[in-house]
Image (cartoon, helix red, strand yellow):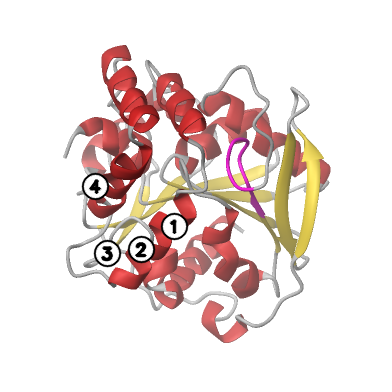
C-alpha cells in the first residue's frame, strides 16, 4: 500500500470491550432528533453540521477526506442521550462551502474550533476518522481548556510519516484526471477483501459527491504536513480505535505521545462505525468514560 493513501485515510494492546461505561451505546441508539445547523469558518466559508442531544460534554465526530457527516449518523443517535453530539461537513465536503483559497489540516482544525464556538461547548471530546484524526489534534490545540481528549478512528497507526510534494502532486493529479477510477481503487483498499460489497459500494457512492477539484486541492495541501509535531504539543490524552487492515505501531506512537492508547478491532477496515457500529460505539463509550 502506497504510504500516501495511508496519510489521507489513515492519518488519513486491545482494549477489553466490557469496561463499565455510562450505559451500552447500542441500548441507547434510537431515533434522536437531529438538527441541521450552520456556522461560518474564519474565512467566511459556510459549515453545515448535524447536532443532536444534550449534556455537559460534547462529542464532535470528524469525518475523513472525501467523506462527509453522514458517516456518523449512527453516532448521533447512539450518544444523544448523554452528550451534545456534533458531526460537521468539513469545507469542500457534503453541504459545506467550497469557496476557500487555502486548504489543509490546520485550516480544517480551525473549522472545528468554529463549530465548537458556535455550539458554546465548554467541554468536548474530539473523534476523528482518518484525516479527521489530525484535524482533531489541530482543533484541540486551538481549544485549550475545552478539549478532554482526542480519539482517532483508524488513524494514528504511526505519527512519523510526512507526504512529500511529489507524492502529494501525484495523488492530487490522479484524482483530478480520473476521479472515478482513483476513488474506486482507494475505497477498495480501505476494506478487507470479504467486506460487504453493498457497504463498499455505498461508501464509494457517498464519497463520489466530493468534487475532483476539492480532492486535488486537498492532496496538494498535505505536502509537508507533520502530524507528529502537532501531537507532541497536544496537552490531552490521545486514543485510537483502529482496524487491523493497517497495523498500529503502538510503541512508535508512544515515543511521540507517551499516553497513547489504542483499541484494535479484529478483522476491521477503515470505517468501523459503518461495519460494526455496536462494537464501535461500545469502544467510544469506554474511552469517553475514561476522559470524563
Between the residue at mark 3 and the residue at mark 1, the CA separation in whole angstroms equals: 20 Å
For residue 268, the mark is 3
State the image coordinates of residue 248 (x, y, percent, origin top left).
Answer: 24, 47
Dot 1: what SS? helix
Give yes or no for contact between labels 4 and 2 (Cβ–Cβ under 8 Å): no
Q: Could you say whether the residue bearing mark 2 is in a helix, strand or loop? A: helix
Residue assigned mark 2: 201
Task: Give the Cα distance between marks 1 and 4.
Answer: 28 Å
Is residue 157 visible in the rendered image? The answer is yes
Which one is earlier in the sequence, the residue at label 2 or at label 3? 2
Give whichever of 216, 220 is nearer the camera: 216
Instruction: Find residue 75 and report its image quarter.
Output: bottom right
Q: Are marks 2 and 1 in contact (CB under 8 Å)?
A: yes
Could you tell me which residue is drawn at 59 percent across and 36 percent down? 92
Of marks 3 and 1, which one's residue comes earlier in the chain?
1
Q: Which residues are magenta?
A: 87-94
- Gap between marks 4 and 2 measured at Cα: 26 Å
Which residue, as the protein is rendered here, is positioned at the far bottom? 27
Would you say the magenta stretch is mainly helix, strand or loop? loop
Cα distance between the residues tagged 3 and 4: 13 Å
Q: Is residue 92 magenta?
A: yes
Residue 277 vertical position relative to residue 72 in the rendered view, above or below: below
> Which corner quadrant holds the C terminus?
bottom right
The answer to whether residue 239 is magenta is no
Foreground mark, 2 or 3? 2
Amino acid at each position: 500500500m502506497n504510504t500516501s493513501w495511508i496519510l489521507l485515510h489513515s492519518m488519513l494492546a486491545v482494549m477489553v470491550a466490557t469496561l463499565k461505561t455510562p450505559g451500552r451505546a447500542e441500548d441507547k441508539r434510537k431515533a434522536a432528533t437531529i438538527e441541521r445547523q450552520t456556522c461560518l469558518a474564519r474565512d467566511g466559508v459556510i459549515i453545515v453540521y448535524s447536532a443532536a442531544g444534550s449534556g455537559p460534554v460534547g462529542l464532535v465526530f470528524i469525518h475523513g477526506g472525501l467523506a462527509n457527516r453522514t458517516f456518523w449518523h449512527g453516532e448521533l443517535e447512539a450518544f444523544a442521550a448523554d452528550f451534545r453530539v456534533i458531526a460537521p461537513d468539513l469545507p469542500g465536503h457534503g453541504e459545506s462551502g467550497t469557496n476557500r483559497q487555502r486548504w489543509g489540516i490546520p485550516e480544517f482544525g480551525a473549522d472545528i474550533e468554529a463549530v465548537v464556538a458556535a455550539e458554546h461547548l465548554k467541554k468536548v471530546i474530539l473523534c476523528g476518522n482518518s484525516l479527521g484524526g489530525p484535524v482533531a489534534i489541530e482543533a484541540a490545540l486551538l481549544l485549550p481548556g475545552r478539549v478532554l481528549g482526542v480519539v482517532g478512528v483508524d488513524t494514528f497507526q504511526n505519527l512519523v510519516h510526512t507526504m512529500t510534494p511529489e507524492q502529494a502532486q501525484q495523488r492530487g493529479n490522479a484524482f483530478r484526471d480520473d476521479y472515478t477510477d482513483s476513488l474506486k481503487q482507494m475505497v477498495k483498499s480501505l476494506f478487507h477483501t470479504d467486506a460487504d460489497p453493498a457497504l463498499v459500494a455505498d461508501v464509494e457512492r457517498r464519497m463520489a459527491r466530493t468534487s475532483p477539484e476539492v480532492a486535488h486541492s486537498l492532496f496538494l495541501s498535505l505536502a509537508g504536513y507533520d502530524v507528529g509535531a502537532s501531537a507532541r504539543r497536544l496537552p490531552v490524552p490521545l486514543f485510537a480505535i483502529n482496524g487491523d487492515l493497517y497495523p498500529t505501531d503502538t510503541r512508535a506512537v508512544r515515543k511521540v505521545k507517551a499516553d497513547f492508547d489504542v483499541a484494535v478491532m479484529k478483522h476491521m477496515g477503515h470505517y468501523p462505525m459503518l461495519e460494526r457500529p455496536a462494537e464501535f460505539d461500545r469502544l467510544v463509550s469506554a474511552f469517553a468514560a475514561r476522559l470524563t
